[in-house]
Image (cartoon, rainbow, N blue to C red):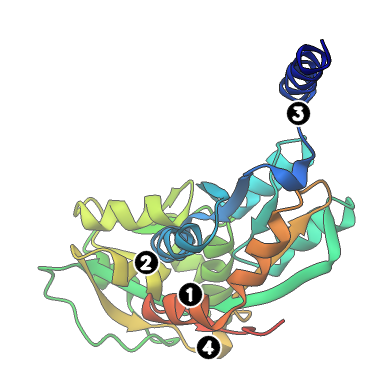
Amino acid sequence: MSALYRAASIGLCTALLLAFGVPAQAQNQTITVFAAASMKDALDAADKAYMQDHKDKVVVSYAASSALAKQIEQGAPADLFISADVQWMDYVAKAKLIDPGRRVNLLGNTLVMIAPDDSKLSNIKIDSSLDLAKLTSGGRIAVADTKAVPAGLYTKAAFEKLGLWSKAEPQLAQAENVRAALALVARAEAPIGVVYSTDAKAEPKVKIVGTFPANSHPAIIYPVAVTAKAKPATGAYYDFLRSDKAKAIFTQYGFAVLNSGS
């Protein structure tokens, strides 16, 4: 009877564990990441490396940082947020939606002008004398939304600093995020566009024809933070993003690493 009783007890315990779940630390967890669209290629590669060494799974939602910040504000279950600018990270921080002790400026980038790979444009000096009408020949300039999306905000700031905004604004084809702007140029639907250098590197159908002066816009910074309601496993992933292994991957994809240590 005692053996039968023990078997019954084990069965009951197993049923209770299945019904109510084992402690979170004992489970393989799915880490949900909200990341700026421009991070896709590099972060996909980094996540692949992470999952080779960890049992937890990483799932990423890519979009404009502005859209992701709003989704987090509305209760979307993100464990970690990577923004393409400080502004939108500050936005969620002000709402107390991230862990302030686990936030760091992770990466940097460069703003460039692109054209389709078969374009005759090349070696354009981007300054106040730039003739945008001549460059576009009646076409549009593909950019991310200049009212909210980081890449668009950097672009607007650069055109304003160079005294070109009044001429540029009527020619803009504004897209929902920087990768959508990149696609317009890759499909030759726009003769030029403004994206990050990492985007241009990721798309073989475009080429960089000019680089915006670094002092023409705010520094392009990608902050990363663990959210206030993140799963326990997120801490290890956050540490990985700052590791030498992740640093090498981000550098390979053209990002400048701003913080690699703990």
Does 89 appear above or below 111? above
**Image location (x, y in percent) of residue 168:** 44, 65
- Mark 1, other Cα within 10 Å: few <14 / some 14–19 / many ≥20: some
- Most extreme residue toward the front is 1
- Mark 4, other Cα within 10 Å: few <14 / some 14–19 / many ≥20: few
Badge 2 element: helix
- Mark 2, other Cα within 10 Å: few <14 / some 14–19 / many ≥20: many
From the image, state whether disc 2 or disc 3 is nearer to you: 3
Q: Amino acid at mark 4?
A: Ala
From the image, state whether disc 1 or disc 4 is nearer to you: 4
Mark closest to the chain's N terminus, 2 or 3: 3
Say which mark, if any, is on residue 21. Answer: 3
Say which mark, if any, is on residue 181. Answer: none
Q: Amino acid at mark 3?
A: Gly
**Image location (x, y in percent) of residue 109:** 50, 78
From the image, state whether disc 3 or disc 1 is nearer to you: 3
Q: Is residue 173 left or right of residue 109?
A: left
Residue assigned mark 4: 214
Badge 1 element: loop
Mark closest to the chain's N terminus, 3 or 1: 3
Placement of the C terminus among the 4 image quadrants: bottom right
Mark closest to the chain's N terminus, 2 or 4: 2
From the image, state whether disc 2 or disc 4 is nearer to you: 2
Residue assigned mark 2: 199
Badge 3 element: loop
The one nearer the camera, 200 or 259, is 259
Q: Amino acid at mark 1?
A: Leu
| Label total for image | 4
Residue assigned mark 1: 164
Distance in Å between CA atoms under marks 2 and 4: 17 Å
Q: Is residue 141 left or right of residue 53?
A: left
